[in-house]
Amino acid sequence: MNVYDFIFYLFAAITVLSAFFVVTNRNIVYSAFFLLFTFFGVAGIYVLLGADFVAIVQLIVYVGGILILLLFGVMLTNKITNVEIKTGTINIYPAVIGVGLLSGSLLAALITSTWKTFPTDAPLPTTAALGTMLLQEYALVFELLGIILLIALIGAASIARRET
Amino acid sequence: MIEVGLNHFLVVSTLLFSMGIYAIVTRKNAIMVLMGVELILNSANINFIAFTRFGNFGLQGHLIALFVIVLAAAEAAIALAIVLNIYKTLSTVNIDEVDSLKD
């Protein structure tokens, strides 16, 4: 067992265990903070897969943006002074059975199938290549994403601030 | 113990996907449902990047993962605006009690 395998198992354990705590914890603030560790673990897995730029974007956008947004949502929609911050759960047993069947069949399918893999060489820095692709072949998608972000910004502001 | 390969990453992403589905199905709070959606998007991204690493596809998987991250940010912003509006109108964010479009 070399260092790469050890680091992979470490990050996989962080990701899966903290995701388990996210979905089972009854306190929604604790769930949000465990989601932080899940995103960190996923970023570490990206680094292990040789995706340095995507890992940095994951850290900046998810941990710095989306998680803060979710925490703001928690703070604004719960009465912090009361014990309302605990959230209820429904349909536990059907959900456990259904999700168990789903994940079992998915795991069986992907383990029994033989993927055609290529020998992997040492990962190279990807930022320059990604920037070139983004501004040449995928320029239209890049511009469309900019427009989508602008529309989402205007729409979110106008929905949240609507005066009735 | 076998060497870490494509299957290991796929197993991790499958577990994340299952837990995201579990959060969406069982939690009452709308923000917890959003967290489940984020878990599912992360598992899809792990798949894209794992297949980029172990298949011979170039870097397009990385670009798709970046697009997914951008769309997740837009989706979180819009969904939280809607949740705030629901809370202002109906004074609850439990999605089993929100059963009317207007008060």
Image: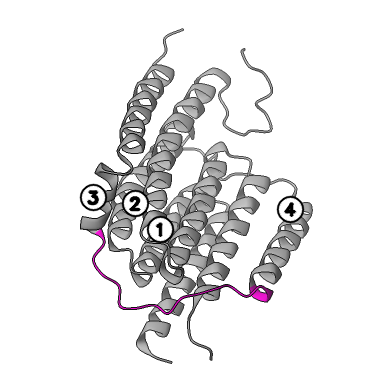
Label 3 vs 2, first from the N-terminus: 2
Give the main secondary structure, helix, strand or loop, of the magenta stretch: loop
Image disc number at residue A4: none
Label 2 vs 4, first from the N-terminus: 2
Residue type (three-letter) at the residue carrying disc 4: Ala
Label 1 vs 2, first from the N-terminus: 1
- What is the span of residues highlighted in magenta in the rendered image? A111-126
- Alpha carbon of mark 2 to alpha carbon of mark 4: how far? 28 Å
Residue type (three-letter) at the residue carrying disc 1: Phe
Callout 1–callout 2 Cβ contact below 8 Å:
yes
Q: Which residue is mark 4?
A: A95
Q: Which residue is mark 2?
A: A63
Specify the subunit that label 1 lies on.
A
Disc nearest the viewer among 3 and 2: 3
Residue A49 placed where, x, y %?
38, 70
Residue A52 placed where, x, y %?
28, 63
Q: Secondary structure at mark 1?
A: helix
Image disc number at residue A39: 1
Callout 3–callout 2 Cβ contact below 8 Å:
no
